[in-house]
Amino acid sequence: MTTAKFQLEPLSCPSCIRKIETTLTKMDGVKEVSVLFNSSKVKVTYDQEQASSDQLKETIEKLGYPVLS
């Protein structure tokens, strides 16, 4: 297992958290997702043989939440 952390642009509402968590949790290899509303940070624990940090980032961005570098 490995952990990836992403800094997002400020989230506008708590339902954004649910959308990100629900979508990432459905991905193969993802074991745990935590999104902090106040700091707009996402922490994902996943199996690196089934998913990659780039895939996670792309999924978050496809939902409409830009990941900051």
Image (cartoon, helix red, strand yellow):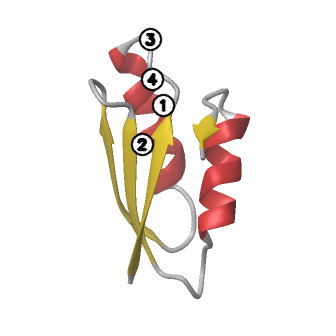
Q: Quadrant of residue 48?
A: bottom right
On screen, residue 25 versus residue 61, left or right, reads left
Residue type at tag 3:
Ser
Residue type at tag 2:
Glu
> Whole-percent x and y of residue 3?
39, 70
Q: Secondary structure at mark 4?
A: helix
Q: Residue at x 61, y 74 (%)?
A: 51
Residue located beneath label 1 in the image: 19
Q: Secondary structure at mark 1?
A: helix
Question: Are discs 2 and 1 less than 8 Å apart at CB?
Answer: yes
Residue 27 to residue 18: above or below = below
Residue located beneath label 2 in the image: 21
The CA span between labels 1 and 3 is 12 Å
> Whole-percent x and y of residue 34?
30, 48
Tell me the mark number nearer the camera, choosing from 1 and 3: 3
Q: Residue at x 33, y 18 (%)?
A: 14
On screen, residue 27 versus residue 47, left or right, reads right
Question: Are discs 4 and 1 less than 8 Å apart at CB?
Answer: yes
> Whole-percent x and y of residue 1?
38, 84
- What residue occupies the far front of the structure in this picture? 69
The CA span between labels 4 and 2 is 9 Å
Residue located beneath label 4 in the image: 16
Question: Are discs 1 and 3 less than 8 Å apart at CB?
Answer: no
Residue type at tag 4:
Cys
Residue located beneath label 3 in the image: 12
